[in-house]
Image: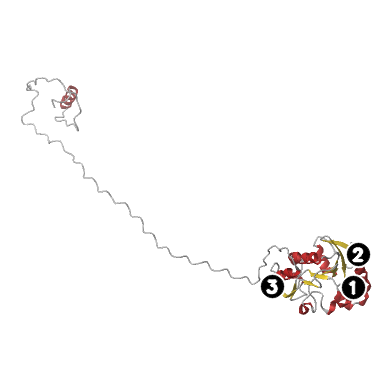
């Protein structure tokens, strides 16, 4: 312990005086080199007693061997990609859903009729007996707007071509009017004409692009509208139509003057209505002659 600083030696001697014979240091402290001093002879008081038990050597501590590096956990193997089964196809609805695409602008009556044949814009397309959007000559100075094909119209291939229409057309010819171009509010003739739940304003709006374009393509300068139901649907839900008081009045139909009159099937059954229909046709003659 002679290579230890004097302060440490004094501390060690102090520990012995307290009864600690041996003092072990964990590690030597770095010290500066001290000048060499001749060792003094140990006095008798400084020598250890003869029969003093020898202190066991300080225990030596060995560092434990380094632990083996634990292997990194393996990443789980990717699962095999199984093809997903396609989603089951939606079951078709019992009722066909109307396809409400915009009605295009037609260049001819033939193009309009072809489009009406394939139209699915309202529920009538799933419950129709026939499809007729037009009748009469392609162009005329006046036009007739009716509800839908009637009587023999379907078999004859044109609206207002059945025998029921003969009294009206004959009366018009007797006044000097040419045969009119004809448009139908409903191109689809319903399978059950008595079912009015599928002949309302909703369906009329879906088909409006057809019959308005038919009137424009005809070049007509006035329109004769047949009966109360066709007049109501043509004017819209916001316009009240009191029948028969509304009959014979001039009203505007998308820029064209219009007159409402009795349906020819009613005229064929009630001859007393002939003077009223005659007066309405004369108004048509006056309107197309004044323009």
Left or right, 126 with respect to 225, comes to left
Earlier along the polypeptide chain: callout 3 or callout 1? 3
- The relative height of residue 96 versus residue 269 in the rendered view (above or below) is above
Locate residue 235, reporting x and y percent.
82, 63
Where is the N terminus found, in terms of image quarters? top left
Give the number of the mark in front: 3 or 1.
1
Query: Residue 200 is drawn in which quadrant?
Result: bottom right
Residue placed under numbered mark 2 in the picture: 289
Locate residue 86, reporting x and y percent.
51, 67
Query: Residue 172 is drawn in which quadrant?
Result: bottom right
**Label 3, label 1: how far apart the Cα atoms are:** 36 Å
Q: Are marks 3 and 1 in contact (CB under 8 Å)?
A: no
Give the number of the mark in front: 3 or 2.
2
Earlier along the polypeptide chain: callout 3 or callout 2? 3
Q: Is residue 285 visible?
A: yes
Secondary element at tag 1: helix
Secondary element at tag 2: helix
Residue placed under numbered mark 1 in the picture: 172
Give the number of the mark in front: 2 or 1.
2
Locate residue 174, reporting x and y percent.
92, 74
Q: Nearer the viewer, residue 113 or 258?
A: 113
Q: Nearer the viewer, residue 9 or 101?
A: 101
Q: Is residue 146 visible?
A: no
Locate residue 2, reporting x and y percent.
13, 25
Q: Circle 2: is it few (<14), some (14-19), or many (20+) Cα within 10 Å?
A: few
Secondary element at tag 3: helix
**Label 3, label 2: how far apart the Cα atoms are:** 42 Å
Give residue 126's mark. 3
């Amino acid at each position: 312990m002679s290579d230890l600083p004097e302060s440490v030696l004094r501390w060690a001697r102090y520990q012995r005086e307290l009864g600690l014979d041996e003092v072990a240091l964990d590690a030597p402290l770095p010290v500066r080199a001290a000048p060499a001093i001749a060792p003094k002879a140990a006095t008798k008081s400084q020598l250890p007693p003869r029969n003093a038990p020898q202190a066991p050597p300080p225990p030596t501590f060995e560092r434990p061997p380094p632990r083996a590096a634990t292997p990194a956990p393996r990443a789980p193997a990717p699962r095999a990609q199984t093809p997903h089964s396609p989603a089951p196809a939606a079951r078709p609805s019992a009722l066909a859903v109307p396809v409400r695409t915009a009605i295009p602008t037609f260049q001819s009556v033939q193009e309009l009729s072809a489009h009406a044949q394939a139209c699915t814009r309202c529920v009538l397309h799933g419950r129709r007996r026939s499809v007729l959007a037009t009748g009469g000559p392609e162009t005329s100075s006046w036009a007739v707007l009716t509800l839908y094909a009637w009587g023999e119209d379907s078999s004859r291939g044109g609206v207002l071509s059945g025998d029921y229409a003969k009294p009206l057309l004959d009366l018009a010819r007797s006044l000097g009017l040419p045969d009119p171009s004809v448009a139908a509010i409903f191109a689809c003739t319903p399978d059950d004409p008595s079912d009015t739940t599928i002949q309302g304003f909703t369906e009329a709006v879906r088909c409006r692009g057809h019959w308005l374009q038919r009137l424009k393509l005809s070049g007509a300068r006035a329109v004769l509208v047949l009966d109360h139901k066709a007049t109501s649907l043509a004017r819209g839900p916001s316009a009240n139509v009191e029948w028969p008081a509304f009959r014979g009045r001039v009203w505007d139909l998308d820029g064209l003057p219009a007159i409402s009159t009795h349906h020819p099937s009613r005229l064929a059954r009630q001859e007393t209505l002939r003077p009223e229909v005659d007066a309405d046709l004369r108004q048509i003659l006056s309107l197309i002659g004044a323009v």
